[in-house]
Image (cartoon, rainbow, N blue to C red):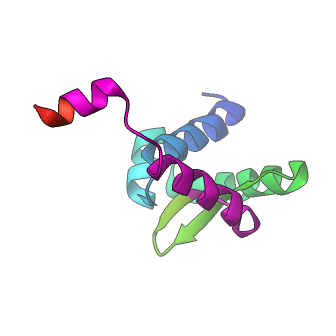
Amino acid sequence: MSFVENISAVEAILFAYGEPVPKAVLSEGSGIDQESLEKIITLLNDRYDETGSALQVLKLGDSYQLATRLEYAPAVKKVFETGRNAALSTASMETLAV
């Protein structure tokens, strides 16, 4: 894989995993050694900063997680609250009834 493909692979794993990914798991899954992995995380965060992205990669102990920036929390929270209060469709109600 090229360096750009390595960055994209790490980003894809972080996105798909949805939870903190242990460094060893991220390294093994992407095929990138742990030292290079740290450089890639830094480059990803630099890219997100430069483009004004709502995303960031957090380091949580020995794990990494793709997350939204704190300033977007109200918008994200609003969407989750709206989704929870949505009425169930007829098909969903029938499934629950069974």
Q: Can residue 43 be seen in this view?
A: yes
Q: Which of 75 and 46 is in front in this view?
A: 75
Residue 91 percent across, percent down from the top left: 29, 24
User: With 9 as the anchor, is 41 left or right in this view?
Assistant: right
Is residue 92 toward the left or the right of residue 48 in the image? left
Task: Classify 64 as above or below 85.
Answer: below
Q: Residue at image x 37%, y 37%?
A: 88
Against 91, is 70 above or below? below
Q: Is residue 61 above or below residue 27?
A: below
Can I make out residue 31 in this image?
Answer: no
**Which residue lies at the image location 37% right of the left edge and 29% below the top edge?**
89
Q: Which image quarter holds the C terminus?
A: top left
**Residue 92 in the image: x percent, y percent?**
29, 30
The single residue placed furthest to the bottom in the displayed view is 61
Residue 16: image location, x then y, percent:
47, 40
Residue 81 locus on image (x, y percent): 53, 57
**Residue 83 or 29: which is nearer the viewer?**
83
Residue at 21% x, 27% y: name it. 94
Quadrant of the frame with the N terminus: top right
The residue most toward the left is 98
From the viewer's perspective, is 21 left or right of 70?
left
Magenta residues, start to end? 66-94
Q: Main secondary structure of the magenta part?
A: helix
Picture mark count: 0
Q: Image quadrant of residue 46? A: bottom right
Image-based side of 34 in relation to 47, left or right: left
